[in-house]
Image (tube, grey):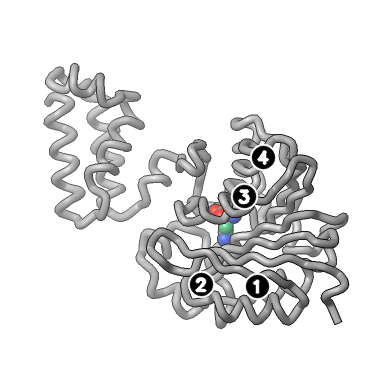
Amino acid sequence: MTYQEVYRSVLEELKKQNIADASSDAWILLEHITGMDRTRYYADGEKEMPAEEAGRFLELAKKRASRVPVQHLTGVQNFMGLEFAVNEAVLVPRQETEILVEEVLRTVKPGMRVLDLCTGSGCIAVSLKVRCPDITVTASDISEEALRIAGKNARALGADVAFFQSDMFGQMEGKFDVIVSNPPYIPTRVIEELDEEVRLHDPVSALDGGEDGLYFYRILSKEAPRYLADGGRIYLEIGHDQGSAVHVLLAREGFREIRIQKDLAGLDRVISGVYNRHNKN
Ligand code: GLN
C-alpha cells in the first residue's frame, strides 16, 4: 500500500471511532513514524510505504482508536512552541495553560525569582526560563517520576531550572517574586465523569483537587505569603467555575489587585494577585 492509502485508511478508522481531531492525529502519527513533513508526503505519497513502517503506523492508529491520547503514543506535546516529553506520570500540557505562562511573562522582570509548584512535565517552569532567561526558576512536584520528566525536558530545552521534590510548600525555603501553579483542581466526584482519554491516561494525582476542587488553592493562598517577597505576585490556573471561590480565598489571605483572565472560550482560566505585607491586618 502507498503512504496515501495507509494514511487514508487510518483517517477513516479514527473518524469511525469518533476521535475528535482524527485528521490531525492521523497526521501526527504518520509524521512520528516516518519523519515525513507535508512536502515530502505530497511528493512521495504515492510511493509504497515500507511494510514495517506501515505496521507500526497501524499499530499506533489502533491504540489511538481505543482512545489512548496521541501524546502518549508519540511521547511529546507542544507547549509555548516547545516540545515537551510526556508520559503517564505527568499531566499532558494543555493549551489553556499557555495563558497562565503569558500572564507571568507580561510582568516578570530579569533577576526575578520564580517558583512553579506542581510542575508536572515542567512545561510552565521550562517555558518561562526559555522565554525569559534572566530569571531564576525553581520548580517542585510531589512526584519523583514527574520530576524526572521535568528535568529531562529542562535539559533538552537548555533551561536551567532548579527542581526539587516537595508536597506543596513542605520542603520550601527562601523567597520568590512570583509563585505560579496549575494545581490539580477537579472535584473528586467529577473525575469519573471526565472523558476516558483524560480519566484513564492523565495521572489522577494531577487532576484531583479534593472534594470541592479547591484543596490546593487553600494551601496556595494560605502559604504563599510566607514565600513571597513584598509586592510579590501569585498566578494560578483555575477551573472555569472557580474564579469567585479562589478570589475569596486570596483576598482573605491579604492578596490585592486580584484579577481573573479568561481563556479563548471566554471562560475564567487564570487568577492573579499581589501580596504587600502592610496589607495584611
Ligand atoms: N504544571 C503542569 C501543567 O500545567 C502540571 C499540572 C498538574 O499536574 N496539575 O501542565
* Closer to us: 261 or 53: 261
Residue labelled with disc 4: 129
Question: In 3D space, how far apart are the residues under numbered discs 2 and 3 (Cα atoms)?
Answer: 27 Å
Ligand 1 near label 2 (Cβ, under 8 Å)? Answer: no
- Mark 2–mark 4 CB contact (< 8 Å): no
Q: Earlier in the sequence, mark 2 or mark 1?
A: 2
What is the spatial separation of the Cα atoms under label 3 and label 1, in whole angstroms? 22 Å
**Tag 3: Cα neighbours inside 10 Å, few (<14), some, or many (≥20)?**
few
Question: Which mark is first along the chain, 3 or 2?
Answer: 3
Q: Check disc 1 and report the residue beneath it.
A: 217
Q: CA distance from mark 1 to mark 4?
A: 24 Å
Q: Which residue is mark 3?
A: 106
Local secondary structure at mark 4: helix
Question: Which class describes the residues within 10 Å of circle 2: few (<14), some (14-19), or many (20+)?
Answer: many
Amino acid at the residue labelled 1: Tyr
Q: Residue at x 53, y 64 (%)?
A: 261
Residue depicted at x 80% and y 64%: 170
Residue at mark 3: C-beta within 8 A of ligand 1:
no
Q: Nearer the viewer, mark 2 or mark 1?
A: 1
Which quadrant contains ligand 1?
bottom right
Which marked residue is nearer to the observer: mark 3 or mark 4? 3
Q: Secondary structure at mark 2?
A: loop
User: What is the three-letter code of the residue carrying label 2?
Assistant: Ile
Residue to which mark 2 is pinned: 186
CB atoms at circles 1 and 4 under 8 Å apart?
A: no
Residue 199 falls left or right of residue 274:
left
Residue 158, image quadrant: top right
